[in-house]
């Protein structure tokens, strides 16, 4: 939420050592982070990550499946959903879309906080969009939007969800609906991050809708 608006200082750990991360102002972050976990769980997770990155997705996921069964939701809330998200991403890497979606759907049954729920619904929407299953992509993104708006009201994260949903509508040639959602996203970004790349992205997306309409005067 803060990244497009200004620099951020984060406190975390790297390799078990307390670390401060200074993140400059910019677009949405593409950093990978992981929740804190006990040493034995972390070792199994790292072993699974190494196998997945080496191309042995089946073995890596098998290790992560063990982790999911070992995690106690009461002591580490959210960790099971996070691990299932990693499993989903690994299956996508291995071109196993059905297994990837199954992992996401299982994660949704585990997720309790709105932030996790939104991330999972958006990931599911992205997977359906990539498979050209636009109706399901729309349903998933609308679920993410409803949860996010209930939890936070207006925010840059909501603007992002609006833009992604609008793009799915554009691909269905529902151009008027797409334009309205892109305009909502633009208004939020103008208020909350007026000199950001996200705002420029909204303008580009509206131009794409105008082009699809053949409305060259508004471009």
Image (cartoon, rainbow, N blue to C red):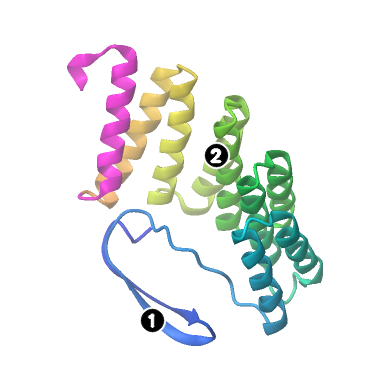
- Residue visible at 40% across and 18% down? 175
The residue depicted at 38 percent of the width and 50 percent of the height is 156
Predominant secondary structure, magenta span: helix
Label annotation for residue 70: none
Give SS at disc 2. Answer: helix
Q: CA distance from mark 1 to mark 2?
A: 32 Å
Q: Position of residue 114 (x, y in %)?
A: 58, 55
Q: Is residue 181 above or below residue 96?
A: above
Residue 111 figure quarter: bottom right
Is residue 107 toward the left or the right of residue 34 in the image? right
Residue that lies at the very extreme toward the top in this rendered image: 214
Quadrant assignment for the N terminus: bottom left
Q: Which segment is the magenta one?
A: 195-219
Quarter of the rendering occupied by the C terminus: top left
Q: Position of residue 76 (x, y in %)?
A: 69, 74
Q: Is residue 26 magenta?
A: no
- Frontmost residue, 191 versus 49: 49
Residue at which label 2 appears: 126
Residue 68 left/right relative to 135: right
The residue under label 1 is: 20
**Is residue 117 visible from the viewing direction of this image?**
yes
What residue is at 44 percent from the left and 46 percent from the top? 158
- Rendering coords of residue 9 (x, y %): 34, 75
Secondary element type, mark 1: strand
Vertical comparison of 172 with 151: above or below: above
Q: Is any part of residue 155 visible from this angle?
A: no
Q: Quadrant of residue 63?
A: bottom right
């Amino acid at each position: 939420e803060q990244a497009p608006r200004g620099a951020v200082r984060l406190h975390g750990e790297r390799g078990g050592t307390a670390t401060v991360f200074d993140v400059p102002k910019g677009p949405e972050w593409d950093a990978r982070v992981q929740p804190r976990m006990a040493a034995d769980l972390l070792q199994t997770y790292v072993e699974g990550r190494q196998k997945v990155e080496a191309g042995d997705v089946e073995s890596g996921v098998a290790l992560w499946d063990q982790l999911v069964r070992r995690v106690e939701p009461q002591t580490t809330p959210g960790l099971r959903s996070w691990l299932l998200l990693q499993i989903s991403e690994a299956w996508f890497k291995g071109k196993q879309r059905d297994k990837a979606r199954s992992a996401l759907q299982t994660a949704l049954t585990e997720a309790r906080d709105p932030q996790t729920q939104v991330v999972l619904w958006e990931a599911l929407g992205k997977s359906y969009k990539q498979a050209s299953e636009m109706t399901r992509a729309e349903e998933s993104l609308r679920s993410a939007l409803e949860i996010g708006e209930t939890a936070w009201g207006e925010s840059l994260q909501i603007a992002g969800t609006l833009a992604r949903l609008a793009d799915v509508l554009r691909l269905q040639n529902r151009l008027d609906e797409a334009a309205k959602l892109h305009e909502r996203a633009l208004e939020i970004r103008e208020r909350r991050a007026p000199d950001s790349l996200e705002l420029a992205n909204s303008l580009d997306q509206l131009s794409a809708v105008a082009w699809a309409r053949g409305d060259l005067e508004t471009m």
